[in-house]
Amino acid sequence: MSEIRDTVILGSGCAGLTAAIYTARAGLKPLVLEGHEPGGQLSITTLVENFPGWPEGIQGPDLIENMKKQAARFGAEFQLAHLSRVDLNAHPIKLHTAAGEILTRTLIVASGASARWLGLPSEQALIGHGVSSCATCDGAFFRGHEIAVVGGGDSAMEEALFLTRFASKVTLLHRRDAFRASKIMLERAMAHPNIELRPNTVVVEVLGVEEKDVKGLKLKNVKTGMEDELPVKGLFLGIGHEPNAKMFEGQMDLDEDGYIKTTGNVLTTFGGKAIPGVFACGDVQDRRYRQAITAAGSGCMAALEAEKYLEERGH
Ligand code: NAP
């Protein structure tokens, strides 16, 4: 018979590691399943300048490493396992990984959301070197430079508008000439003197792989087939995020885009009823703020709820 854990945390980004620090300090010996993107989105960013307490900023991977050390100091354990299946109806909750079955009284889901990328090799090679999926995180590095944003939804409009605070010019590239963005956001972007909209345009290649720094973009007009180069210092992807919650379909209430629905900030439900002992925090349940500090905050809330749940049941 496997040991029954008090708490398992799914995901090792900001939310999961904060939940690990709190549950570990409460003596719950949490097991953190690191998932397929250990460290989450912060592990692929460079300088983080908006996490309170770091006046000079801190590198994203260092911030994550510090949080991990902090959780480990209080007894959190880490496993690189990837979850293949869960049974949230079972008591204890059953988690299946390639390494075997894990039983736990509480589960904190902090599996995050993954930014969508175009998937070009040159784009992947330059992530953190001029290619970014987070304007709030990286916009300030492009003060006075020309940049491009890809996407035709509200995220892309919001990113483009936000980036005009820093960039001298923002070119908004969209693969069609119809936009998903809400009318008001599209109108704001169109009216901005420093934003140029280029519809029917796709990125063929990001230039600068050899130099390890974005030097420009090779673009193609999908209507005319014409190719040209756009000399920009940065490329921001605003083509949406995918919450990592597919494995909970049919066992947890998800919204129309697959984000976990929560009540009371971090409590999960199925069919509108609370799922005992299962909490969700961070980007997998937050489509609005998506910041390291808000993820950390909700990780703390999930940990406190898990602690309370166990205490009420005499564990
Ligand atoms: P979205 O509405 O799904 O839009 C994604 C955009 O990216 C679409 O224009 C899509 O093009 C494009 N795209 C997707 N994959 C692409 C690819 N491989 N290459 C090129 N283009 C690609 O996502 P979102 O903008 O993140 O918004 C998600 C939800 O959050 C929406 O409900 C939105 O209203 C909401 N949101 C609201 C606000 C706000 O109100 N302030 C801000 C952000 C997000 P196609 O149109 O051709 O498919």
Image: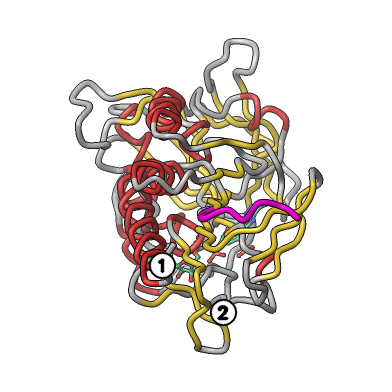
- Figure check: 179 above or below 234: below
Image quarter (top left, top right, bottom left or bottom right) of the C terminus: bottom left
Q: Residues within 10 Å of mark 2 (few under 14, many from 20)?
A: many
- Number of the front mark, 2 or 1: 1
Q: Distance between the residues labelled 2 and 1?
A: 28 Å
**Disc 1 designates what residue?**
314
Q: Position of residue 12 (x, y in %)?
A: 52, 41
Q: Which residue is drawn at 38% across and 51% down?
A: 295
Q: How crowded is mark 1: few (under 14 residues within 10 Å), some or many (20 or more)?
A: few
Question: How many marks on residues?
Answer: 2
Q: Is residue 116 found left or right of 185 in the rendered image?
A: right
Q: Which amino acid does label 1 sit on?
A: Gly
Q: Position of residue 239 (x, y in %)?
A: 56, 54
- Which quarter of the picture shows residue 186? bottom left
Among the two numbered marks 2 and 1 on one chain, the one whose residue lies closer to the N terminus: 2
**Disc 2 designates what residue?**
253
Q: Which amino acid does label 2 sit on?
A: Asp
Q: What element carries label 2?
A: loop
- Figure check: 61 above or below 27: above
The front one of 217 and 265 is: 265
The front one of 133 and 231 is: 133
- Figure check: 275 above or below 41: below
The front one of 7 and 41 is: 7
Q: Do the residues labelled 2 and 1 touch (CB within 8 Å)?
A: no
Image quarter (top left, top right, bottom left or bottom right) of the N terminus: bottom right
- The range drawn in magenta is 1-7
Q: Is mark 1 on a helix, strand or loop?
A: loop
Q: Is residue 222 found left or right of 297 in the rendered image?
A: right
Q: Position of residue 34 (x, y in %)?
A: 60, 40
